[in-house]
Amino acid sequence: MTTITALTEADRDDWLSLWQAYLTFYESEVADDVTASTFARIVDPAGEIQGAVARDDDGRAVGIVHWFAHPATWSKTHYTYLEDLFVDPSARGGGIGRALIAHVTDAARASGSDKVYWLTAETNATARALYDHVAERSGFIHYQIDLA
C-alpha cells in the first residue's frame, strides 16, 4: 500500500535522493543553492509550491511530486501545474505515478482549480504511457526562452 503525504522538513534526505535521481533521469543539474531553496519553498506552509512524497509499505520513499496553482486568463479561478513527478525506477509499474497524479488532482479540485496540466519529454515513453491513460494530450507544443 502506497502512502502519500505532504513533504515536511523531516523528509529532506529522502526528497533529496529522489530529486537527484529525477535530475539525473533528465540529464540535468540544478545548483545546490537552488535545490536548497526549492525544498525550503516546498515545505514552507506559506509557500506557493506544494509537494508530496510516496512511501511504500516499508516506509521507503519511492516517489515525489511538486505542483503549484497560478492565475489563468481562460478561467475565473486558477490552473494547477504539476511541475515535477518522479518514481524510483525500482518501484515503477505499481501505480505510484498514478497515485501521485491523483493526489495532485484531488488537491487541485479541493482548491477550486479548473485544470491540472504538465509537460514531459517526448522521449519519456514509460511516463507517457501512463499519462495517456489518466489525461488528454492538449495538442500544444512547448516553447521557451531561457533567461537565466
Image: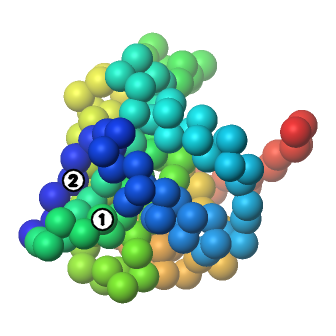
Mark found first going from the N terminus, 1 or 2: 2
Residue contact at pointers 1 and 2, CB within 8 angstroms: no
Q: Residues within 10 Å of mark 1 (few under 14, many from 20)?
A: many
Q: How many marks?
A: 2
Q: Is residue 106 left or right of residue 145?
A: left
Look at the numbered disc 1 and give the secondary structure of its residue: strand
Give the residue pinned by disc 2.
Answer: 4
Let me know if residue 114 appears in the view.
no
Q: Which of these two is toward me, 101 or 141?
A: 101
Q: Which of these two is toward me, 130 or 40?
A: 40
Q: Residues within 10 Å of mark 2 (few under 14, many from 20)?
A: many
Give the residue pinned by disc 1.
Answer: 61
Q: Quadrant of the N terminus?
A: bottom left
Above or below for 10 versus 22: above
Q: Is residue 102 left or right of residue 148?
A: left
Viewer-side label of 1, 2: 1
Where residue 144 sits in the image (x, y, percent)?
Answer: 82, 46
Look at the numbered disc 2 and give the secondary structure of its residue: strand
Instruction: Answer with the quarter of the image where residue 91 lies.
Output: bottom left
Residue that appears at 54% across and 70% down = 21
Where residue 70 sits in the image (x, y, percent)?
Answer: 53, 24
Q: Quadrant of the C terminus?
A: top right
Q: Is residue 62 left or right of residue 35?
A: left
Q: Which of these two is toward me, 29 or 72?
A: 29
| Amino acid marked by disc 1 | Ala
Residue that appears at 22% across and 47% down = 5
Tell me the tag on residue 2: none
Above or below for 79 versus 9: above
The CA span between labels 1 and 2 is: 10 Å
| Amino acid marked by disc 2 | Ile
Residue that appears at 47% across and 24% down = 48
